[in-house]
Image (cartoon, rainbow, N blue to C red):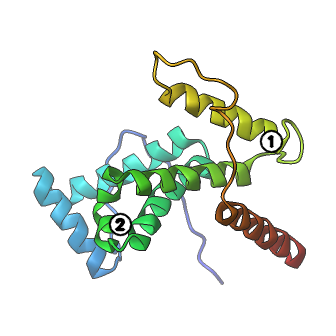
Amino acid sequence: MKAKSVRRTRDNSATVQLSKLRMKEELRAKLERDAEERGCTLNAAIVDRLERSFLVEAILAGPEALRLSAAFVLGGGRAAEKEGRPEWAASGQWRQDPACYESAILAVIKEAWRQHPSPEGGWSFREWISRMFGYIAGLRAPRNVTLTREDLTVSASLGDLEAGRRDAETKRSREEAA
């Protein structure tokens, strides 16, 4: 006969002790370094990190925002590696390089489009790109210059166009396989 697990109700303000918490040594060492850097106990560092993880989860209100953040960091890191600067990926130094930063923005845009609730509905893709480009042009255009439609005409590079088509084909293949 199996023993029933009895859940005790506790006061939310009560402090409890967990025993037999297991983790990899590498994680324990990271937590210990974090505690030392912050001048607190290992226990306080662990509790703070756990509390912050729930706070981040509540702020992000789902995995979509986390995916956008990850796309930004991973996109910039991949660009740094392609630039021959893999050490920038780990240090975050890629954020200082315009080409890497722009690649990170592009990765966020790609991920945002993947998450679009109805990429085939709403605005057409052309309208969406036009609005995004207009907004960016408004951010970057010099104040004392009048822009014409010709100034705002953009053509995609064949490489970017092909990359988008490959992404679309990969998505279709995954959907068909599911």
Q: Which quadrant, please, contains the N terminus?
A: bottom right
Relative to 132, 9 lies left or right: left
Q: Is residue 19 above or below residue 94?
A: below
The type of residue carrying mark 1 is Arg
Q: Do the residues under discs 1 and 2 have CB atoms within 8 angstroms?
A: no
Disc 1/disc 2 C-alpha distance (Å): 33 Å
- From the image, tell me which residue sits under label 2: 89
Residue 155 picture location, percent across and down: 69, 48
Q: Residue at x 67, y 43 (%)?
A: 154
Relative to 5, 18 lies left or right: left
Q: How many marks?
A: 2
> In this rendering, does residue 40 appear at all?
no
Residue 93 picture location, percent across and down: 29, 58
> In this rendering, does residue 116 appear at all?
yes
The type of residue carrying mark 2 is Ala
Relative to 56, 120 lies left or right: right
N-terminal of the pair, mark 1 or mark 2, is: 2
Q: Nearer the viewer, residue 51 or 9?
A: 51
- From the image, tell me which residue sits under label 1: 126
Q: Residue at x 24, y 55 (%)?
A: 45
Q: Residue at x 27, y 78 (%)?
A: 26
Check disc 1 and report its element: helix, strand or loop: helix
Residue, far bottom: 1
Residue 172 picture location, percent across and down: 85, 69
Q: Residue at x 89, y 74 (%)?
A: 176
Disc nearest the viewer among 1 and 2: 1
Q: Residues within 10 Å of mark 1 (few under 14, many from 20)?
A: few
Check disc 2 and report its element: helix, strand or loop: helix
Q: Is residue 58 above or below residue 28?
A: above
Q: Is residue 85 above or below residue 58?
A: below
Residue 143 picture location, percent across and down: 46, 17
